[in-house]
Image: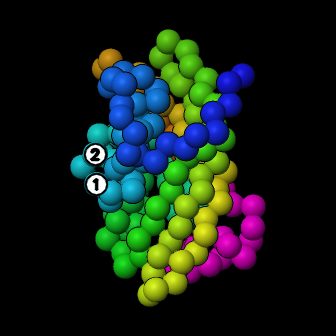
């Protein structure tokens, strides 16, 4: 198992558009730059997609998932995360990235530090990697409550 400690921030140069690493760079670029169009391209836009995260609970299907991103991107808080301490497991038609996210929420001149355990699952759809599942969770209940209160 190869564990990578250098973070993916979304500012890295992508090696190509077909590698798991490049698709993860694209995700973090879209998230950290609040680029909804690029985020939409990163996800499988079907009822089969799912997301379990600290903000929205379980969301099923792209129609529910996109509302979480719209809320984050259109809110008054600026959220930044980077992916680190991760490993990627691949097959011919699927890959799973498992690791941690660290980052910040900035709102009203207050900065909240984030620490999230994260996994992302991608499938190969029409010769492109598309995110089909995301799971994120926080270990610290006080941080989780503050995160939810700030963004919701």
Q: Give the residue displayed 34% in from the left and 65% down from the top.
A: 73
Q: Which residues are magenta?
A: 136-152
Q: Give the residue displayed 54% in from the left and 25% down from the top.
A: 95
Q: Give the residue displayed 53% in from the left and 67% down from the top.
A: 104
Residue 52 colored in magenta in the image:
no
Give the percent coordinates (x, y) of residue 120: 55, 39
Residue 140 colored in magenta in the image:
yes
Secondary structure at badge 2 equals helix
Labels 2 and 1 touching (C-beta < 8 A): yes
Q: Which mark is residue 38?
A: 2
Q: Give the residue displayed 53% in from the left and 34% down from the top.
A: 121
**Closest to the observer, 92 or 45:** 92
Question: On the image, numbered disc 1 is attached to which residue?
Answer: 35
Give the percent coordinates (x, y) of residue 83: 55, 46
Relative horizontal placement of residue 70, taking residue 24 as reference (left or right): left
CA separation, marks 2 and 1? 6 Å
| Residue 62 seen from this side | no
Judge whether 69 appears above or below 18 on screen: below
**Closest to the observer, 127 or 80:** 80
Q: How many other residues sit within 10 Å of disc 2, few (<14), some (14-19) or many (≥20)?
A: some
Relative horizontal placement of residue 131, taking residue 137 as reference (left or right): left
Q: Which mark is residue 129?
A: none
**Closest to the observer, 64 or 102:** 102
Most frequent secondary structure within the magenta stretch: helix
Q: Residue furthest top?
A: 92
Give the percent coordinates (x, y) of residue 66: 36, 55
Secondary structure at badge 1 equals loop
């Amino acid at each position: 198992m190869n564990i990578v400690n250098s973070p993916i921030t979304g500012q890295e140069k992508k090696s190509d558009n077909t590698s798991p690493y490049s698709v993860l760079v694209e995700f973090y670029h879209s998230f950290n730059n609040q680029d909804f169009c690029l985020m939409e391209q990163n996800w499988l836009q079907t009822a089969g997609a799912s997301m379990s995260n600290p903000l929205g609970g379980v969301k099923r299907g792209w129609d529910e998932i996109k509302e979480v991103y719209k809320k984050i991107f259109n809110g008054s808080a600026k959220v930044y995360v980077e992916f680190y301490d991760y490993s990627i497991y691949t097959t011919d038609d699927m890959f799973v990235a498992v690791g941690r996210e660290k980052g910040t929420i900035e709102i009203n001149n207050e900065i909240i530090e984030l620490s999230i355990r994260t996994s992302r699952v991608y499938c190969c759809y029409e010769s492109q990697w598309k995110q089909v599942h995301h799971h994120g969770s926080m270990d610290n209940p006080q941080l989780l409550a503050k995160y939810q209160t700030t963004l919701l």
